[in-house]
Image: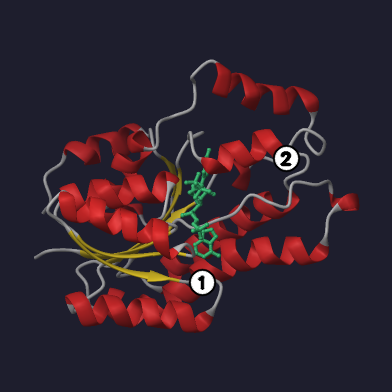
Amino acid sequence: MTSSILLTGASRGLGRAIALELARAGAHLTLNARSAQALAQVKAEVESLGGQAVVLAGDVSQPDVVERLVAAAVLAFGRVDAVINNAAVLEPLARIADSDPVAWQRNLAINVLGPYLMIQAALPYLRKAQPGRVINVSSGAAVRAMVGWSAYCSSKAALNMLTQVLAREEPGIVALAVRPGVVDTAMQAVLRRAGREAMESQVYQRFIDYHRQGQLLPAEVPARALAALALKAPLRWSGRFISWDDPEVQALIETPAA
Ligand SMILES: NC(=O)c1ccc[n+]([C@@H]2O[C@H](COP(=O)([O-])OP(=O)(O)OC[C@H]3O[C@@H](n4cnc5c(N)ncnc54)[C@H](OP(=O)(O)O)[C@@H]3O)[C@@H](O)[C@H]2O)c1
């Protein structure tokens, strides 16, 4: 049975790489991000790999966008087997004392409310899948306090807890929070551009050095792990916060689908 997978934040970076990896694996894709043009480009890339994708541009923090996204997946493919909550923003990069409450709320709306809405809307379909899977793209920042990142750290910590509660409430669904590593995407460019003032200088410099020394992961590398988790993660892992390079996850990449 071909898997039908809903993926947010698919217009660039890690999300685009996950979409292409899933297309190579033959999954049916429903892709979202705000920029329609970039999404159309990714759809063309998926199709050039022989895959199928429907796209819907919109803000994942808006309930009507999320409802239309799930409806589009069901209309096109008749089912939803997995949701990958990948869309997120890093900003505001500011210390709590200096931060803008509106920007802070916006971060939480995209990074936490969005995944919650996606899960809620897709649940009736995920319950019918064998098993349904929710892959929440988290971060090391969920468990490490970073000066200047209060919104992002809080949002990813909340996403990890949302994952754990989902695992308890829905024992037939595999719910995972996944740490993708430090990845060479636009989000890292935002950090280098806007993080200097807010962050601790040695921490900021560490990220500058990762970039200069070519130590950021190409998106394709963690994307392989995330795609494998969306297609094959076993039920017994549900509730975990797991890293892309965990040996069990790396072994899963090589495991044939059941
Ligand atoms: N890069 C890293 O080092 C790193 C490390 C740890 C965790 N992560 C996590 O990995 C995931 C992917 O990030 P990335 O590094 O690939 O960043 P990115 O290049 O900035 O991509 C973010 C994606 O989310 C989409 N997006 C943002 N706001 C949205 C909204 N309101 N509604 C719908 N889509 C929205 C963006 O597209 P539009 O702008 O077109 O909407 C884009 O496709 C995120 O969850 C991030 O927290 C990244």
Q: Which residue is mark 2?
A: 194
Residue closest to the far front:
37
Badge 1 marks a residue whose secondary structure is helix
Instruction: Give how far across and how far down residue 249 sits, in percent.
Output: 31, 39
Residue closest to the far right:
97
**Is residue 161 among the parts visible in the rendering?**
yes
| Eye-nearest disc, 1 or 2 | 2
How many residues crowd around disc 2 within 10 Å: few (fewer than 14), some, or many (20 or more)? some
Name the residue nearer the viewer: 231 or 92: 92
Q: Which residue lies at the image location 22% right of the left edge and 53% below the top edge?
A: 46
The disc labelled 1 sits on which kind of residue? Tyr
Q: Which residue lies at the image location 18% right of the left edge and 58% below the top edge?
A: 27
**Quadrant hosting residue 103:** bottom right
Relative placement, left or right, of 37 versus 154 is left
Name the image quarter holding the C terminus. Answer: bottom left
Instruction: Give how far across and how far down residue 160 sits, in percent.
Output: 54, 56
Q: Which residue lies at the image location 34% right of the left edge and 42% below the top edge?
A: 223
Badge 2 marks a residue whose secondary structure is helix
Residue 116's tag is: 1
**Quadrant hosting residue 144:** top right
Name the residue nearer the viewer: 209 or 50: 50
The disc labelled 2 sits on which kind of residue? Ala
Q: Is mark 1 within 8 Å of ligand 1?
A: no
**Quadrant hosting residue 247:** top left
Residue 83's tag is: none
